[in-house]
Amino acid sequence: MNIFNKFPRTFWVANTIELFERWAWYGFFMLFANYLTGSSDLGGLEFSQSQKGTIMGVGTGILYFLPVLTGAIADRYGYKRVLLLAFAVYVSAFILLPLFSSFAGVFLTYIYLAIGAALFKPVIQATIARTTTEETSSIGFGIFYMMVNVGAFFGPIVTLLFKGSSHLVFYVSAVMVGLNLLILPFYKEPGREGEGNKQPGQSLGETVRSIFLNMAGIFKDIKFILFLLIVAGFWTMYNQLFFTLPVFVAQWVDTSTLYRFFHACMPFISENYSPAPGVMDAEFVTNMDAFYIILFQVLISGLAMRLKPLHSMMAGFLVCSIGMALTFVSQNVLFTLIAILIFGLGEMAGSPKISEYIGRLAPDGKKALYMGYSFIPVFIGNVLAGIVSGVVYQRMSDKVDIAWRFAAENGLQIPKELSANARFEEIARQVNLAPQELTNLLWDTYSPSGIWAVLLGIGLFAVVSLFIYDRIISSKK
């Protein structure tokens, strides 16, 4: 326990801020994919998977690209000021987002929300890097990642209670991120970097110019750039947890076994996390990843202390890739839960080490700048994940598209003005099958689970590339 006493107060304040921010973010984000593509009778917007992939991929990608600028701006103008601005953007964006139902309106408002997150991210990670040492960094980033997942778990658990009203889901997130305005006075600048480089009276334009000059210097660090590109493969696979898995579970996985368990043992859960009798919310199932991390993150971080960051990442990425692939293999919800546990164990071993490794690579005086660039692979990963969860998923695995294909092949006449759920029920009625029986028939006939091979291939590519990087590039002095 002595190691916990070595963290300064600002470390714990930053972790508390991160907790509420992640609570707000994941409270809506875990539900976002099904909100965009879900049936209109359940409050969804009925966008196509490709439209969903564009919004979530490009929008979230922008979120992770902007820290390249916002990290350096925070170094120059103050972490606390940037945090205040971030929370103001966050709150207003959460209030605005549910007011739009068109593709353009949702897309642009989501980008505005992404700007708030982009202002926040490099500041809080730089704070963790500045308040940990080589001795405490592994446990410190493990604690940070656990706090991320405490928020990631409780956010959806709370907002799912309000799933009947999409407006309330977003307003709950606005309230949660707004709580950080009450915590912010206790936050102190952790020896902010870049103060010595800032010239009196420097304009914003001059600051942006210096950022791009620094960017040119970053691209000379070949070792760093190669690492970022490799990690982009991991994030492409990882982001399917939010982009694709909730949709896949809602469309294909039979959750009745889980429903019966909770109905018998914990009826509160079956009553509040079920869109219909015998069915559990898909987001409740996928949110078990965060629950597993809350339980095991500190233990896994303690074990990972004995490994070099790159070795821990390789092991983590491999296990994570296997787990993600397995989540798409079966319609059995218990198999899905086990696969999510495998995925989570790999995530716990690998993901926190990315920030730790970049923190060690960063030269003195440029930690926030390098932390800003640490989001570049996440940016690339989100854009590519949007393609996989959009175009690729729609062609290989989307139940709506497959059902339409089935109807056309069998000469069925289905009214287009019906909601997505009503169309599926009408197809089932016309072929004299119950909806679940039609789902099973489509599963056996069209093999939507085949997308598992795509995700495993992406993850293995990242693992092999990181192995080569470790052997050839990283070993060079």
Image: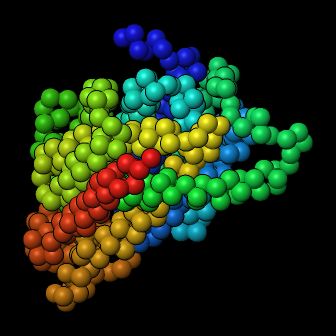
Q: Picture quarter containing residue 179?
A: top right
Front residue of 254/26: it is: 26
The answer to whether 422 is drawn above or below residue 254 in the figure is below
Quadrant (top left/top right/bottom left/bottom right) for the N terminus? top left
Q: Residue at x 56, y 51 (%)?
A: 373
Q: Residue at x 39, y 38 (%)?
A: 352
x and y percentages locating residue 153 in the rendered image? 36, 36
Q: Residue furthest right?
A: 201
Q: Is residue 410 visible?
A: yes
The answer to whether 316 is drawn above or below residue 449 in the figure is above
x and y percentages locating residue 133 in the rendered image? 49, 25
Front residue of 191/399: it is: 191
Q: Residue at x 68, y 45 (%)?
A: 72
Q: Is residue 248 left or right of residue 225?
A: left
Q: Is residue 386 left or right of residue 448?
A: right
x and y percentages locating residue 308 in the rendered image? 33, 37
Rendered image coloring scheme: rainbow
Q: Picture quarter containing residue 189?
A: top right
Q: Is residue 454 left or right of residue 93?
A: left
Q: Picture quarter containing residue 407?
A: bottom left
Front residue of 347/335: it is: 347
Q: Is residue 152 visible?
A: no
Q: Residue at x 57, y 45 (%)?
A: 370
x and y percentages locating residue 102 in the rendered image? 55, 68
